[in-house]
């Protein structure tokens, strides 16, 4: 079973704090790990992605940390803002499956002002 | 570019009714996907298509059918609607090259379906 497990299900952070969302996967053939952000009433949109040949990728306030041996990856949101309040999905795919993504269950992030 | 558009935005069906969810993309993407999103369950792939005339089952295909006669359109058909099909449905598209898994999927705004 190609599963991706995500935690926590919900997260409340104060403005300026660090938000951390974790994902774990089972299939070692996965070679692409994106994070999608979804605002209420909208479709998900790609936020940031990483491949397993690097352990970290940073784009602005968003960082993915990747631990290949533990089969885990996480999203860190630095200086969290109320505008970051959304649902975040981790996902994974493997080259031989084309672009089919296996998604985690999602994390609803609320950043209080 | 409008991106990925979906119609309708909302729909209420009675048990046993049928309907088609429409999806169109104007980005000339070869891959298209249908997902359903249920609370706390993430997005589950229903069907996908790698090009016109080619479709394949995803993780949860039962109760649904698709067709892909053009590059732009990928309708999802629900036959004999059941309460278990109450969900939010998202269509997505991507430009995928053979053997490459790193292509961004672009999602539509979704269709909220309730089956009573």
Image: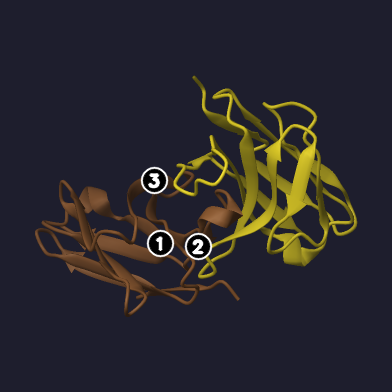
Chain colours: A brown, B yellow
Camera-side residue of A49 and B107: A49
Q: Is residue B98 above or below residue A3?
A: above
Q: Which residue is mark 2?
A: A103
Which residue is found at the position 29% from the left and 55% from the top? A85
Q: Which residue is mark 3?
A: A46
Q: Which residue is mark 1?
A: A90
Q: Which mark is residue B73?
A: none
Q: Is residue B72 above or below residue A101?
A: above
Share a chain, discs 1 and 3?
yes
Which residue is found at the position 47% from the left and 64% from the top? A30
Q: Are marks 1 and 3 in contact (CB under 8 Å)?
A: no
Q: Earlier in the sequence, mark 3 or mark 2?
A: 3
Which residue is found at the position 33% from the left and 47% from the top? A47
* Left or right of A78, for residue B34: right
Q: Are marks 3 and 2 in contact (CB under 8 Å)?
A: no
Camera-side residue of B16 and A24: A24
Share a chain, discs 3 and 2?
yes
- For label 1, the crowd category at 10 Å Cα-Cα, with few meaning under 14, some 14 to 19 and many 20 or more, is many
> How far across and down, in percent of the image, does residue A12 sit?
25, 69
Camera-side residue of B7 and B26: B26
> How far across and down, in percent of the image, does residue B92 sit?
57, 41
> How far across and down, in percent of the image, does residue B91 sit?
61, 43
Is residue A92 in sight in this rendering?
yes
Q: Determine the CA span between mark 2 and mark 1.
A: 6 Å
């Amino acid at each position: 079973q190609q599963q991706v497990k995500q935690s926590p299900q919900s997260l409340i952070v104060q403005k300026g704090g660090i938000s951390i969302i974790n994902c774990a996967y089972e299939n070692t053939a996965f070679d692409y790990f994106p994070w999608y952000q979804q605002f209420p009433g909208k479709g998900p949109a790609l936020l940031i992605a990483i491949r397993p040949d690097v352990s970290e990728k940073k784009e602005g306030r968003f960082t993915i940390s990747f631990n290949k041996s533990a089969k885990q990856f996480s999203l860190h949101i630095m200086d969290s803002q109320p505008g970051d309040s959304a649902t975040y999905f981790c996902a994974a795919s493997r080259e031989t499956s084309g672009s089919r993504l296996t998604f985690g269950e999602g994390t609803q992030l609320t950043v209080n002002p | 570019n409008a991106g990925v558009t979906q119609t309708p935005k909302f729909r209420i069906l009675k048990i046993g009714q049928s309907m088609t969810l429409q999806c169109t993309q104007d980005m000339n993407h070869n891959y298209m996907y249908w997902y359903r999103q249920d609370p706390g369950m993430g997005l589950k792939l229903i069907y996908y298509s790698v090009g016109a005339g080619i479709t394949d089952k995803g993780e949860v295909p039962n109760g649904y059918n698709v067709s892909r006669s053009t590059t732009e359109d990928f309708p999802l058909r629900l036959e004999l609607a059941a309460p278990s099909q109450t969900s939010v449905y998202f269509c997505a598209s991507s430009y995928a090259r053979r053997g490459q898994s790193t292509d961004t999927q672009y999602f539509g705004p979704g269709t909220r379906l309730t089956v009573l």
